Image (cartoon, rainbow, N blue to C red):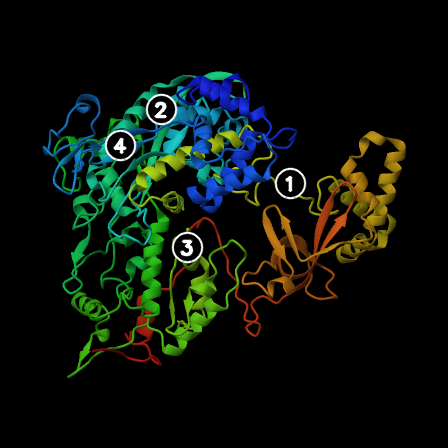
Amino acid sequence: MDDNDFGDFGSDPYEFANVIGDGDQPVYPGCRKYTKLSALVKLYNLKAKHGMSDVCFTKLLILQGDLLPEGNTIPTSMYEAKKTLCALGVSYEKMHACPNDCILYRKEYEDSTNCPTCGISRWKEGKDSILKEGVPAKVVWYFPPIPRFKRMFQSHETAKSLTWHAARKSIDGQMSHPADSPPWKLLDDKWPEFGNEPRNLRLALSSDGFNPHSSLSSRYSCWPVILVTYNLPPWLCTKRKFMMLTLLISGPKQPGNDIDVYLEPLIDELKSLWVGIRGVYDAHNGEYFTLRPALMWTINDFPAYGNLSGCVVKGYKACLICGDDTPSRRLKNGHKICYIGHRKWLPINHPYRRQRAAFNGKPEYGIPPKPLTGKEVLHMVENGDRVCWKKKSIFFDLEYWKYLPVRHALDVMHIEKNVCDSIIGTLLEIPGKNKDGIAARLDLLNMGVKTDLQPEYGERRTRLPPGPWNLSRAEKREVCNSFYGMKVPEGYSSSIKNLVSLQDSRLLGLKSHDCHTLMQQLLPVAIHFVLEKPARYMKVLKGYVHNRTRPEGCIAERYIAEEAVEFCTQHLSDVSTVGVPSSQKMGVSKPLSGCTNTEEVLPYIEQHMIHIKTAYPKFRKRTKWLQDKHNSTFIQWLRFNVQSELEEDNHGVSENLRWLAAGPNMAVPLYRSYLIKGIKFNIKAQDDVRTTQNSGVYLLAHTMQVASAKDKNPILSNMGFYGVIQEIWDLDYQKFTIPVFREYNDVIGDEVLGDVIIKCELFTKGMPNVDTFDELVGELGGQNIRGGCEDIWIE
């Protein structure tokens, strides 16, 4: 560590200097591997990663002290260890708040004892109705971001990563990073002095309620406010280490629309940050600069979106884009409001616009309204035009907020989980999650849609004719068996097998990421043969709670202790971090793809093809013969030519090419599993005894395609190859190794084998081609009742 590491850490600089001195003090006399600080950081890493309690950690420290030689410097208690580490951390502030969410006792209200709005006391009331003076009724924990921003740049690696966005290569026409987004570009264009400094931070704010007591209490809601830094590369910006906790709003009830009261200190600091922080030290460039962070948008689920933006999220005018013209309708039997105008956002010639039977019985000819700009929203709320607005959001206090084209974003994972639960619940008729019932059928009847599915009332029971979405008992079992037998790559999702209940044909315990994988890929595979032919930081915060009576205090104390550990790991060698898991994707060098696929070998391939055509002029036009000859003779030819070049000029041949031409060791080790660029591959025999599968591989190759063995006019084009790994070889070229898979090719799409092709694209470039449902209905005679399926009876 150098002198620049001493800025903005700890309240006592002498105490901080003493802790830094411990970095060179051996953990016991004569120890060369560990110092007191590195040993303590590693031990605390174990505690944080495995959720060890304070009592257990204290006993572990005592045991470690007894095992080590006399004179060791291991702390003897959790209190002593925390005192050592917290000298390196950044403190937090405890602010008193009105229990009714009216004010924070700060600035002009700092010395008040009663809320000026509601008159309630600042102090907590005991069981005997006596006020406990000095004990606040409600507390907000504030973690100032300025010193934490400074500390990010005091790490050489982190400071370098914070300018990653400026050095990356953007892909035209694709939004692969927030740097491609309109808000990012607007900040660069409107404030060039801000955009010209790549170290200026672009932030996103997220907040949501969670229950710190897990399943022990369902009424307690604690609200953290988290900042995410988009300057970092995608594989770092959402890691635990870089998710900055700034506010912790205590429960038991959620703040609702009064959340602006608690955001005041953060907004005040963001306003001062926009002016700039002078004297921030950049460890990567070794210089001081002025740092200016900017908040680009918020990310929340739909209810929290309404709390932060101030817009209405329920009722007849719940669409922020449509406003007064929101196409809404109250369902008479379902007692809910539905919104039926989504098709206006489709292209004007899209078939869905003309369909009636599949939607509300009417075609859609409307055009989508333009979203309101920040200036328009601000003008509406300031002039009392609040039909769709409840308040003026506190974010408009930021100078740049009204200019941003996108100010609030929705968390897709929340929405996707709700939709997935409804689809799975309806398909498998899971009680409590099934959206099909008498009320839904009667509402369809009132709308004049699918009238043949109306309930049929009997003396004792009501019959619901099966619709196209209803599955028979055999089909439900088939779907559940499909899920039960699925094997996915390791780390892809939860074990799908553990989520299936075969007895009652349902899926249980689906998490957000499970729903994401189901919606995107797995569900279409599972229902493929039964259809008719025509994505957690909150869990980390929960894990901090060990004292159920003071959950927010536990979170605050363990958060700053972990911050101190993260700071130490940046300056100590051979110490792993907590906030960035030892991901298989990090620190893995890019392996060579093989002898004939490296850039150094490609010129030799071209020379060899010219050599073959010259040596065999009669076969110059027979492409397949030339390729076969090249495959059989290239290795020997390359070895001879490289050896000749080495004898003439030793500087013209790279070391890699020299070893490649020499060939690998003939003794080849075999592996059952192999890690390449963070991806784990298994052989088929290994997958057969596991619940995951990592033996299937796919390769897109530019290769020669022939119609038959006698085809004399082959075509060169891209072709996909599927296979299953049988053996993994590791070819040893002395200076490096190259993993090689021996596999057998499978026939994709063969119904006998049961293979299904899934095409997965990250971004949809256009609308899919669809058939017009109304034309299909005409062919079927307007029938919506599904044949071969049991009726639904309701007592």
Q: Nearer the viewer, mark 3 or mark 2?
A: 3
Instruction: Tell which circle, 3 or 2, labels the residue nearer the N-terminal end.
Output: 2
From this viewpoint, which residue is outermost toward the bottom?
Answer: 459
> Residue 326, which numbered label?
none
Looking at the image, is mark 1 or mark 3 earlier in the sequence? Answer: 3
Res. 727 in view: yes
**In the picture shown, does residue 621 fall above or below 686?**
above
**Element type where label 1 sits in the image:** loop
Q: Which residue is mark 3?
A: 516
Label 4, residues with CA under 10 Å away: few <14, some 14-19, many ≥20: some
Horizontal and vertical percent for residue 197?
Answer: 45, 22
For badge 1, the amino acid type reads Ser
In the image, is 235 to the left or to the right of 519?
right
Q: Is 401 or 567 nearer to us in this picture? A: 567
Q: Tell me which residue sits at (16%, 32%) in the image.
A: 122
Image quadrant holding the N terminus, namely: top right
Q: What distance separates the C-alpha of mark 4 from that of mark 1? A: 43 Å
Please, is residue 304 above or below residue 79 in the view?
below
Residue designated by label 4? 263
Spatial CA distance of label 1 from label 3 is: 30 Å
Distance (Cα) linking label 4 and label 2: 26 Å
Report the amino acid beneath label 4.
Answer: Leu
Instruction: List the residue tagged with mark 1.
Output: 589
C-alpha separation, residue under disc 3 versus residue under disc 4:
31 Å
Position of residue 282 in the picture relative to residue 432 (left or right): right
- Side (left or right) of 586 relative to 6: right
Q: Residues within 10 Å of mark 1 (few under 14, many from 20)?
A: few
Say whether disc 4 or disc 2 marks the residue closer to the N-terminus: 2
Disc 3 marks which amino acid? Answer: His
Q: Position of residue 348 (x, y in %)?
A: 31, 51
Residue designated by label 2: 190
